Amino acid sequence: MRRWLPIVVVLMWASPVLGQDAGTGTGTGTDTGTDTDTGTDTDAAPPPKIGVVVAGDPDDTLRNTAAFIETEATASGLRVPTDPALRKAMRGEPATDEDGLDGMRSIRRGLGLDPRKDLESYKRIGIITGADALVVVHREGDILIEVFDVSAAQFYEGALHFGDSSSKQRVEFVRSRAEQAQRRWSTPAPPPPPASSKKVNEPEQPADESRAKRRIKKAWPYLVAGVLIAAGVTYLIIDRRDTNEAEPPLLRFRPGEE
């Protein structure tokens, strides 16, 4: 027993030291739980979608200009209709085969030189193509570019001369208006105003109805009864006057007569 005593004392003395060494925590930072969030928003809205339309006589210059503007827009990140035949119909290019776009071509042919006189037609084209905005290419001496807001069914103010503008200016001109049109298109409609409750037992009175008329409506049964009574009394009086009954005979006594 005595020979084990020194060993027990040594173990009792060493145990707190060992416990202290075990909790020193070197903090090597080997934790692999790094934040891998790249900051990309998967719910971000897609870029605006546009359609390029040629108004008026679609000569080769206007069609080529419209196709060039469409290429600039897609290169900048804007979206266009995915159907190439639909885009050609909007530029006024003739159909090469049966593509079912005769209606679109008919609407485009009806577009006049003044775009603001054909707002309903541009609205229909925008809805068919699913575009937020339409880029309208037409000629007034020079080739002009205007942007139509599909949701508002209105043109934005200002036109851009194609020959006097750079590619950067055209892209910014189209993009700024298309983004605004997209925001307007995606904004939910305001809720309808709450309906005012009406009392069932108190119907509304017409605005032009006077107080006297309302009193007459309430008292009309009494008026009818009074008229009937007056008519009956009058009838009895008249009937009494028209009766020619002989008065009862009277016997008169005169002296000296038998």
Image (cartoon, rainbow, N blue to C red):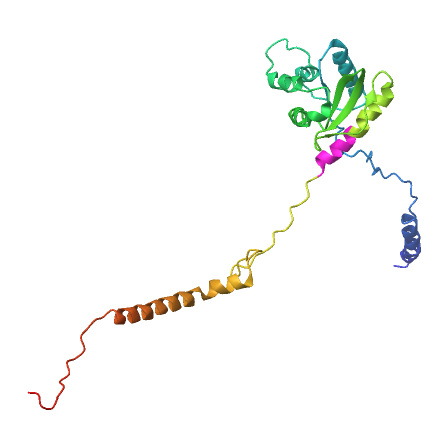
Q: Nearer the viewer, residue 229 or 2?
A: 229
Of residues 51 and 197, the one nearer the viewer is: 197
Apparent side of residue 249 relative to residue 206 in the rendered image (left or right): left
Rendered position, 37 above or below 175: below
Q: Quadrant of the C terminus?
A: bottom left
Image spot of residue 242 (x, y percent): 25, 69
Left or right: residue 75 compared with residue 191: right
Front one among 229 and 20: 229
Residue depicted at 86% across the width and 22% down the height: 169
Q: Which residue is located at x 30 percent, y 68 percent?
A: 235
Q: Quadrant of the N terminus?
A: bottom right
Residue 50 visible at all: no
Q: Give the range drawn in magenta.
A: 178-187
Residue at 66 percent across and 27 percent down: it is: 120
State the count of labels.
Answer: 0
Q: Quadrant of residue 8?
A: bottom right
Quarter where residue 239 is shown? bottom left
x and y percentages locating residue 181 in the rendered image: 75, 32
Magenta run includes residue 258: no
- Name the outermost residue toward the left: 258
Q: Which residue is pictured at 92% across the width and 57% down the height? A: 9
**Residue 120 visible here:** yes
**As drawn, which residue projects farthest toward the front?**
256
**Dominant SS type (magenta):** helix
Residue 150, image x, y percentages = 70, 29
Measured from the top left, where is residue 7 in percent x and y?
A: 91, 54
